[in-house]
Each structure stands twice: as C-alpha cells, then as structure tokens.
Amino acid sequence: FRQNLHPSWINKMASAPPGFGHDGAAPVSDLGLQVRGGYPLGPVRTNYALYVSNGPELVSETEDGIEFELEGVDAEGFNRDADGSKVFGGRLGLLPMAGLEIGISGATGEAAVTKYEDEVSGETIDVSDQGKRDYDVYGADFNYQYRSLGLRGEYVKTKVGSTDSGLTASGGANWSTWYAQAAYRFLPSRFEAVVRYTDFDSAIDSKDQKQTAVGLNYLFASNFIAKINYELNDGTDGSSPEDDNRFLFQLAYGF
C-alpha cells in the first residue's frame, strides 16, 4: 500500500487503512537502496523488488511510572542507522493470469529504541545505547481487475523482539493489520463505488481499530478524482479517535 497506492490520486479512498500509517503495522518509509525488475517463470510473469535500508527506530513508554513497554515503530526514512545494523527486504509478485497479481514480501534486521514517552511528565525523552532488538516484517497482497470490478487486499505483520539491555529494556511486541477492498466503476459514467474493511491489531490495546469505509468517487480523468467517504470506526476503549465515525471529502490530482 505505502509504495503503490498511498498517493491520494491512486488510492480509491480518502484515507489510508488503519495500521498503514504512523505507529502502524506497515513501515511508512525507509532510506536505502532498492533494485526492481521482472522475469518470466515458465508461463507465469513475475516482478521483484529487493532493498537494503537504515531501518526504523523504536519508541517506548513507561508503564505505571517504572516499567517500559514498546509503544510504536518509527519508520520515517531516517538518514542514520541508530542501531548500526541494516534491514534487508523485498517483494515477489506473481501474475498467474490476466488481471491478477499476488505478492509476498518481507524484511528482516535489527532496530533499537531511540526515545521514550514518560507517563508521569508527558515528555518525550531521547535515549541511546538501548540494545538491539530483532525486527521482522511479513506481508502478502493481491490485486484482481475484471472489467469494471477491482478487488484488492493486503496483510502485514511487524514483530519486534525483546532486550535486557539499557534503560528501556522490555519484552517484544507485535503489530498486524489487514484490509480488503472492492471498487466498481459504473460504465459508461465516471462514477465509482468503493467499500473497504480493515482490522488493525496494535501492540497498544487502546489503538486497536476495526473500520468499515464506503465511498463514491467521480473520475474526471485517470489522474484527477473527487471522493466522498464515510468511515465507521470501532476502537477498544470507547473514547479514542479510533472510535469516531467520520465523513471525508477529497479532491486529488496527480502530476
């Protein structure tokens, strides 16, 4: 999603699925080197992407004022490698028939906590030398297009290991999310209906979120779209932003 569908004029909805943004299950961005290509595998076409990068940094928080727990994965394309170890990853896409692509992806390496949020003071404190943790991401996705109907979905899971080194030593944590989406173009008109369901499971229970979103789009051109969406959101604590239903309106143009 982040690489191919995130641009607003490509995304059929006015928002990203829960878990594909900051502190989600899917990395937002990274800084490194990537190679891409494709080759035939018998009668099946394939494509691939392989990369090496600096990797993410981790955010911890105090619990009950004394213990620490992982709060999130900060993947913002850092121009430094805080833990001194690179992350290696890639994706393999298979196109077994016309209109269908199936992909599997993954990344592995190490990451370290570089800041923590103090529960008592509310301050964010920078730290270093907090010990390396295993960092692994797994994913699978599909995209199917048949005439005016488009179906797609994706699953991502991020696992961060434990460490007994440093001030912020704590156990590991997992984040996972998946979404499924259907879009239908009412030819020969320029209107398109979209529905998407997402289930995000965060390492922090209060950030868990299930979302059902419906939308109606108007395509002025292939790179110019107007959207109106309604999201039904269901969090876990009944009071967080993850529980707020909302209307979204968006006009997007791709250069």
Image (cartoon, rainbow, N blue to C red):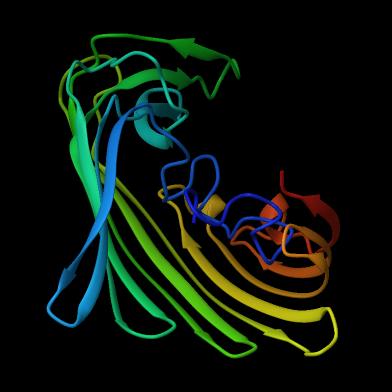
Q: Quadrant of residue 169?
A: top left
Taking depth in this image into account, of 108 and 73 the one nearest to the observer is 108
**Image quadrant in which you'd find residue 210:** bottom right
In the rendered picture of this protein, how many numbered marks are placed on residues?
0
Left or right: 74, with 210 as reference point: left
Which of the 4 image quarters holds residue 91? bottom left
Identity of the residue drawn at 78% across and 90% down: 187
Q: Can you see residue 32?
A: yes
Between residue 159 and residue 7, name the one nearer to us: 7
Q: Image point 71% across, 60% down: which residue?
A: 243
Residue 202 vs residue 213: left or right?
left
Q: Report the side of 230 relative to 50 (left or right).
A: right
The image shows residue 152 at horizontal and vertical percentages of 50, 76
Residue at (53% x, 24% y) in the render: 119
Q: Quadrant of the C terminus?
A: top right
**Which residue is rendered at x = 67% and y = 79% of the image?**
195
Q: Position of residue 154 (x, y in %)?
A: 42, 68
Q: Nearer the viewer, residue 35 or 29?
A: 35
